Image (cartoon, rainbow, N blue to C red):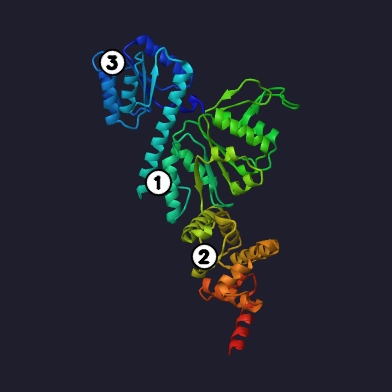
Amino acid sequence: MKLSEYAELPVMIVDDEVETLRSFQILLKSAGIRNVTTLDDSRVVMRELDQREHAAIILDLTMPYLPGADLLREITEHHPNIPVLIVTATSEIETAVECMKKGAFDYIVKPVEKERLLSSLRKALELSLLRREVSSLKESLLSERLRHEEAFNEIYTASPRIHALFRYVEAVATSQQPILITGETGVGKELFARAVHRLSGRKGRLVSVNIAGLDDHVFSDTLFGHRKGAFTGADQPREGLIAQAGEGTLFLDEIGDLDNASQVKLLRLLQEREYYPLGSDLPRQTDTRIIVSTNRDLPDLIKSGKFRRDLYYRLKAHQIEIPPLRERKEDIPILLEHFLTEAAESMHKPKPAYPPELLTLLSAYHFPGNVRELRSMVYDALATHRKGILSMERFREAIMKESTVTDRETPPGSLPRDDCLVSVFGRFPTLKEVEDFLIAEAMRLSKGNQGIAASLLGMTRQALNKRIVRARQQRG
């Protein structure tokens, strides 16, 4: 990881020699560190630290007024999370040991080797950033309140699990590390990416792209851009999405579909913070924050050799796993109201009331398409609605159609194993016992409503009623 990734983190240099301060400042800025404070009077350091937070300090030992060793003790006592690099001409081992005991992060002897100093500073900034993130995460997760509720206005929820994710997002949004957002199709992964960007405080904009199905050439051209003449048809140079995002955020959806060659390029982008436009031999630096999402199981893809392990661990520096709608059914009433309002406004219709049984029907459904599927159901139902109470018929038809498709597409190997059936029945059941069990479960979930139960079972109400009557007769 390059120092330029920490360009905005504030670094303080304390030395009584002005020339040393100037040379260190030039060295750091040439390495990408732009936020540098220089002080030649050790007496003002603590006042400066009280007024403004710093990520690391480079400190000389031999100074007038307040010696560096005394200042080190004060810094580590009052600001223990700031790593302090001692850079001094004093080479005695005893002095070095004493400084490390007092809490110094590193001890470097002058004349300073450029790479030695930059490497140590990079590690110090990594540690400082990690400490900040842990502190922010603790504060967010222990608090029940959000500091920036407005950032989540697009996400309608009453789920404690989603609100816990909101607090996590607040904690990691300002991090410069990548974020991996996982969850089934339709759970709202892009909405979370937008929330992260709004909370990040980054200067650039959010640029989103779905990379599913892109071959390596198109992926490279889309992200990195190209120079004029880079390939046939490249009559004009074109900026890629990374350049368009600038100091903002690049959101890559469906990362699990990325081919191997593109994965290598993305890994280099994350590690080196640089990329090559097509047709160019000169790398371009970037400060773009990367967020990726997928509905696929990346560990499974790693096992099958379709996804790089090193890229996976680089991407999941922070991970947001969004639960499916069927695991947060308390959101269904809120989402139903929101989508009814939204659909009514878009179709210039009055918002209709709906029967209470509709919530029972929707709460008993497993929603493989999650929030997006519920939205489509509402829009479809409202499109055919004329007046009065909203009909449940379009919802029932959608659920029955999905149940039929699921039955047709379910391969034999994905059916419940015999041990699952035995755990329910105590032995391998007969077909009649399984049928009775499913009907009883459907009736329980639908709270005794045969129409809703029939929708869940993928049959007509008449067919279900016949089975129920027949079962009663057989028991009688």
Image quadrant of residue 231? top right
Q: Nearer the viewer, residue 405 or 401?
A: 405
How many neighbours does mark 2 have within 10 angstroms: few (below 14), some (14-19), or many (20 or more)? many
Q: Nearer the viewer, residue 328 or 261?
A: 261
Query: What type is the residue that disc 3 sits on?
Result: Asp
On the image, numbered disc 1 is attached to which residue?
A: 149
How many neighbours does mark 3 have within 10 angstroms: few (below 14), some (14-19), or many (20 or more)? some
Please provide percent x and percent y for residue 25: 41, 16
State yes or no: discs 3 and 2 in contact (Cβ < 8 Å).
Answer: no
Residue at 58 percent of width and 63 percent of height: 385
Residue 389 seen in this snapshot: no
304 versus 267 height, above or below:
below
Q: Nearer the viewer, mark 3 or mark 2?
A: 3
How many neighbours does mark 1 have within 10 angstroms: few (below 14), some (14-19), or many (20 or more)? few
Please provide percent x and percent y for residue 132: 39, 36
Q: Is residue 157 left or right of residue 277?
A: left
Image quadrant of residue 313? top right
Element carrying mark 1:
helix
Mark 3–mark 2 Cα distance, whole angstroms, equals: 68 Å
Element carrying mark 2:
helix
Q: Is residue 134 left or right of residue 184?
A: left
Query: What type is the residue that disc 2 sits on?
Result: Ser
On the image, numbered disc 2 is attached to which residue?
A: 363
Query: What type is the residue that disc 1 sits on?
Result: Glu
Please provide percent x and percent y for residue 120: 44, 24
112 versus 168 height, above or below:
above
For marks 3 and 1, the one nearer the N-term is 3
Mark 3–mark 1 Cα distance, whole angstroms, equals: 43 Å
Label placed on residue 41: 3
Quarter of the image that includes the C terminus: bottom right
Mark 1–mark 2 Cα distance, whole angstroms, equals: 27 Å
- Spot the residue most to the top: 19
